[in-house]
Amino acid sequence: MKTVYIIKVGGNVIDEPVVLDKFLSDFSKLNGLKILVHGGGKIATELSKTLGIIPQMLNGRRITDAETLKVVTMVYAGLINKNIVAKLQALKCNAIGLTGADANTIPATKRSVEETDYGFVGDIDNFNLAIQSLKLFLDNRMVPVFSAITHDGVGSLLNTNADTIASALATALSKEYETVLLYCFEKKGVLKDVNDNNSVITKISGSDYDRLKQTGIIYQGMIPKLDNAFTAIDNGVKAVYICHADDIISIINKGEQKGTCLIKEK
């Protein structure tokens, strides 16, 4: 069975042109089949403010009203996505920029209103992705580059968490490939002490995760990332790494232990 690497990049990597160029150069050199998923960095927030749209966040998640949806679509699916694709093409990596609407790869459902109305935000059914479309790209040696935009199947685009998209892609493709998921950002992994970048927790099981949350070592923005990671592990993904963007070649091409590896409970 062939292996596919699903790599999500976000955080400050997207915001810093020199750092992004280094990451994309490394990504272009990775062996085997691969998919890149990217977030939006700070650009959407900055553009929203320029346009007089006040960004609204709750628990680290963006509330997406109709005007904000226009901005995030322009930034995520347009500016960032196409710049990344152009840079990868310059590196002889045959990338194709996509949203979840393209080839119906990632249909989603608008999040229901419970305590909070998140607006035009999409939730994904991991088992409802268009695997055959993805196989067509991968089997023809194209490199899909997904922005954090999906669609509802009836004409509306939806803002969707990039970590969730990466987890859903890895889970869906695990039926056809051996899938490995990497979450890459500016930290070396999951840290015992957020102020010490060398305090990496090298392995975390599901029970470890529960304990680390209860003791407050893992909190805030890392929780949804790890929730997505363990969802992937529990649904057929071979391995999940949370690592520094500089470590992808070491992990994939050299088989070295870098960052935090999430493991399935025995």
Image (cartoon, grey):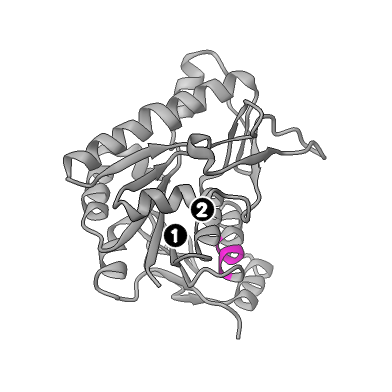
Instruction: Give 51 or 218, whichever is nearer the viewer.
Output: 51
Q: In screen coordinates, is 11 left or right of 152?
A: left
Q: Name the residue under label 2.
A: 131
Instruction: Give 116 or 30, whichever is nearer the viewer.
Output: 30
Question: Residue at image x 33%, y 59%?
Answer: 33
Q: Where is residue 224 in the image (x, y as percent from the top left)?
A: 60, 54
Q: Residue 122 carries which label?
A: none
Question: Residue at image x 54%, y 48%?
Answer: 130
Amino acid, disc 1: Asn
Q: In this view, does 249 lie above or below 207?
A: above
- Location of the C terminus by quadrant is bottom right
Q: Quick one: label 2, few (<14), some, or many (20+) residues within 10 Å?
A: some
Look at the image and say whether residue 66 sits in the magenta stretch.
no
- Location of the N terminus by quadrant is bottom left
Which contiguous range is marked in magenta? 229-233
Q: What element carries label 1?
A: loop
Q: Where is residue 72 in the image (x, y as percent from the top left)?
A: 51, 28
Q: What element carries label 2?
A: helix
Amino acid, disc 2: Ile
Look at the image and say whether residue 231 sits in the magenta stretch.
yes
Of all residues shown, which one is farthest toward the right? 114
Of all residues shown, which one is farthest toward the top? 52
Q: Mark 1 points at which residue?
A: 195
